[in-house]
Amino acid sequence: MKGGIEVSDLVLRLFVDLTSIGLLALLIGQRRPRRGLFVVFTAFNVVLFSVLTVITERHIGPAVGFGLFALLSIVRLRSEPFSNQELSYFFSALGLALINGIRIQDRWVSVVLDAVILLTLFLVDHPAIHQRTSRTRVTLDHVLTEPRALHAELERRLGVRVVEVTVIEVDYVRESMRVMVRSVQPGGTAEPAGDMGDFDAEDRR
């Protein structure tokens, strides 16, 4: 029927999208094994694909598109926070749905763009390129003003290699300080996301 949904084209686009999100899920499982990410990203991708299919076929006005982005903002504010790396996977899932959800004449263009997104993620998030790190809030029961001494003390207490230290608060009255520590994780350990760990360091010397 003229102007209706072409079933063969829809099935082909859906197959390409599911294949792409499946490969993305494999990357998430290997690089970011955080519980729930696979479900969230896959469901978002499929839902957005379905919505775009209806919008493009029924010629719904641009206001619906703006409403979708407003909804995304609400979900982002009300949901558990993602790390910067996890956000890159989230936007990739969004991009895959946009590319495959909109009907274009040259289907090979969508396949190439899907491959570009997946290959880019595979390369830029490869463990060989960068070391995985974790962040921990540490409370010390004494004040150290010398950066090198603070760095060495944190490595001694935490038993890890510290790559960055940020002082959050210094209390000279109570002789304590709170710092944010970024440390290197052992090989094979996934980078955590969401809430950071807390560590109270008492002087046991």
Image: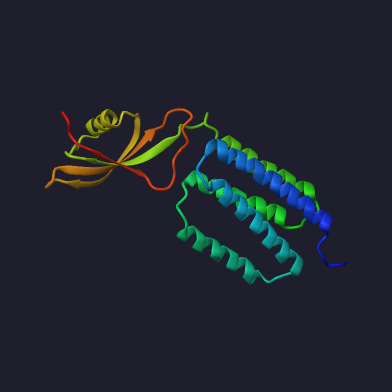
What is the quadrant of the N terminus in the image?
bottom right
Q: Position of residue 195 (x, y in %)?
A: 39, 47
Residue drawn at (46%, 60%), measured in percent from left and top? 78
**What's the residue at 83%, 67% (across, down)?**
3
The image shows residue 8, relative to residue 176, as above or below, that is: below
Residue at the farthest right position = 1
Type of colouring: rainbow
For the C terminus, the quadrant is: top left
Q: Which residue occupies the foreground of this view, 140 or 118?
A: 140
Foreground: 114 or 145?
Answer: 114
Residue found 87% across the figure and 67% down from its top: 2
Q: Position of residue 54 (x, y in %)?
A: 72, 65
Residue 145 image position (x, y, % from top left) = 19, 38
Find residue 9 and report its image quarter: bottom right
Kindly identify the residue that appears in the image at 42 percent across and 48 percent down: 194
Q: Position of residue 197 (x, y in %)?
A: 34, 42
> Would residue 185 appear left or right of 63 to someone viewing this image?
left
Q: Is residue 91 visible?
A: no
- On the rendered structure, is 60 left or right of 27? right
